[in-house]
Image (spheres, rainbow, N blue to C red):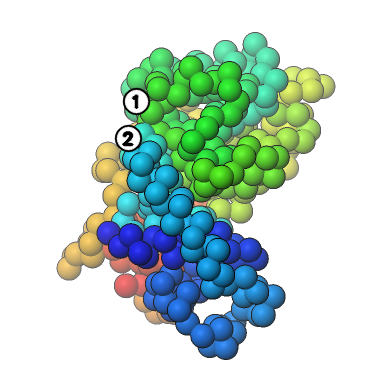
Amino acid sequence: MYSEEELVYALALQKTAKIGDVIAKRLIRHCGSAEAVWKEKKENLLKIDGIGTFILADLQNSKNIKAAENELKFIQKAQIDVHYFLEETYPVRLQHCVDSPIVLFQRGTANLNAPKMISIVGTRKATKYGTQFCEELIDSLSPLQPTIVSGFAYGIDIVAQRAAIKNNIPTIGCLAHGLNQIYPKAHERYMKSVEENGAFVTDFWSTSNPDRENFLKRNRLIAGMSQATIVIESAEKGGSLVTAHIANSYHRDVFAVPGRVGDSQSIGCNNLIKQQRAHILTSAADIVYLLGWELDTEPFQPVQKQLFVDLSPEEAIIHSCLQEKGQMVLDSIALECKFPIHKIAPILLQLEMKGVVKPLPGKLFEAV
């Protein structure tokens, strides 16, 4: 558990102009803490690869410290949970995403490291077909108790989250603004049920409004928190396709529900399938089979390295490769081990959970 002072400095870094999550994490890992970054001489920070004077222009601005102190007061008063990216409470799946937030805010009781977690997104103009498919899908999955992640927006998002509530399944709403408000206002009536049955998460402060660009940034949380992203109806362009593409970049599974040729709200899904960016989804069985849920009985929690660890044949091959070669990027592991690249990321995640592999900056992995 990090100190209140460290959180203030982390929040101040989050507030600093020109320093995004990628650079912030690089600085913190180099210096050892957010406080150390703030107190380090700029000439020393400039020696870090990729760090220039433009990036550091607003660093150590006292206004950002004051703003961070005010935000922390709001967080404490509103009893919001804070997950710092160096803490064990931080979602493990997000740790694998290079652009994940350094600080994540949560209101509600959902386990952000639930063993089964999927994101469901889609058009805001859901058809009867899309709505019915979404409801039936979640109803079919309910015996497995997966956590349903979405954006709490109009259309497929809220259909999925209402269906989760109806089936007593945990649901997480990823917001594009601070936790002092809700958007859209029409969905206020679902807030209590979501908090009691799951949670809201965001990396935006209470001073942030639901601006258009925030929704695109929010989509990385939807894609990054889950094992897979499911797209149920999408026009040729839209936020749900952005989420799918982000999930692809994270090497997560993507599923898309096919629709009739020519239907405006099916073009996006049909294109994902045609371009081999998504598995075709026709029933809950597709998800269960491709994610291996029928075999998944262990809780999704990090564990300490043990003297003897049981590894599957595929895990053993990758672990031996990393032991022999040292630090490697995902693409190189796939090439060396002769595995399809889409299979490598989930295997690496399991190896990390078993305490025998750890991720490093720059998308590198090494054996422990």
**Image point (62%, 70%), residue name:** 58
Q: CA distance from mark 1 to mark 2?
A: 7 Å
Helix, strand, or loop for circle 1? helix
Q: Quadrant of the C terminus?
A: bottom left
Q: Nearer the viewer, residue 319 or 250?
A: 250
Marks 1 and 2, the one that precedes in the sequence: 2
Q: In the shown orientation, is residue 262 left or right of residue 212?
A: right
Q: Tell me, for residue 39, which label it has, or none.
A: none
Asked whether the residues under the numbered discs 1 and 2 touch, taking CB atoms below 8 Å apart as contact, a structural biologist would say yes
- The residue shown at (36%, 41%) is 77
Q: Position of residue 256 (x, y in %)?
A: 62, 32
In this image, 345 relative to 351: left or right?
right
Quick one: label 1, few (<14), some, or many (20+) residues within 10 Å? Answer: some
Residue 95 shows in this picture: no
Three-letter amino acid code at disc 2? Thr
Q: Say which residue label 1 marks.
A: 196
Q: Which residue extends farthest left?
A: 307
Displayed quadrant of residue 50: bottom right
Residue closest to the eye, 359 or 211: 211
Q: Is residue 77 above or below residue 167?
A: below
Dot 2 crowding, Cα within 10 Å, few <14, some 14–19, many 20+:
some
Q: Residue at x 46, y 52 (%)?
A: 70
The residue to which callout 2 is attached is 109
Q: Quadrant of residue 292?
A: top left
